[in-house]
Amino acid sequence: MSFQRVGLRFAQQMRAFAPRQTLRSSLQQRFASTHPSPPGQAGSKLVGAQDNAFNRERAAVKAHAAATSDLWRRLAIYVVTPCLILGAINAWNLWNEHWEHWEHLPPLEERVEYPYQNIRMKNFFWGDGDKTLFWNDNVNYHNKDKQQ
């Protein structure tokens, strides 16, 4: 019996509440209030006590921030990305040209090794002790046995 009373009372409250505000209008208000229009435009939500200098300035700052972030997002997509792609293509072409020049040089073993190159006061503690940490076999050459 008590469940029936609770259900009846709830139905009466909902019937009394329905004319003032429906579910649809409450959702519309919720979504409309999240994106207020800037002050001075139609649809401004600042009325009565809310319409003061602080709230108007805050709404203006929010509108400015939205416009500025949109500008920087567009710049990042339409300016920075193509520039990065063009820079990568340019670097790739320069890299290939660089190695084309290396093909015309004599082999590493035939090049002159000057006394100031590959000076070792003490062996490195990795590998065979003769190669630096950034050793590249395609570019660097050092023969311990070769004397000038």
Image: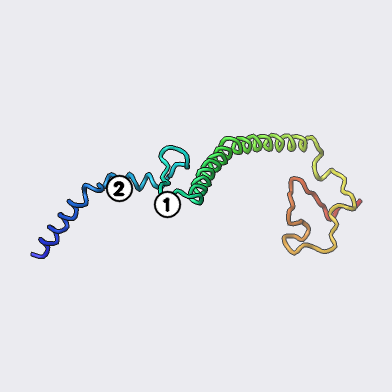
**First in residue order: circle 1 vs circle 2:** 2
Q: Residue at x 14, y 59 (%)?
A: 9
Q: Element at badge 1?
A: helix
Q: Which sits in the foreground, 114 or 79?
A: 79
Where 131 sits versus 72, above or below?
below
Q: Is residue 98 above or below residue 116?
A: above
- On screen, residue 66 versus residue 136, left or right, reads left
Q: What amino acid is labelled 2 in the image?
A: Ser
Instruction: Tell me whether the residue at label 1 lies in contact with that at label 2, contact meaning CB atoms closer than 8 angstroms.
Output: no
Q: In the rendered image, which quarter contains the N terminus?
A: bottom left
> Residue 39 location in percent, x, y?
47, 42
The residue under label 1 is which amino acid type? Ala
Residue most toward the right? 148
Residue named by callout 2: 26
Q: Position of residue 37 (x, y in %)?
A: 44, 41
Residue 108 coordinates in the image, percent (x, y)? 80, 44
Which is more toward the observer, 119 or 2? 2
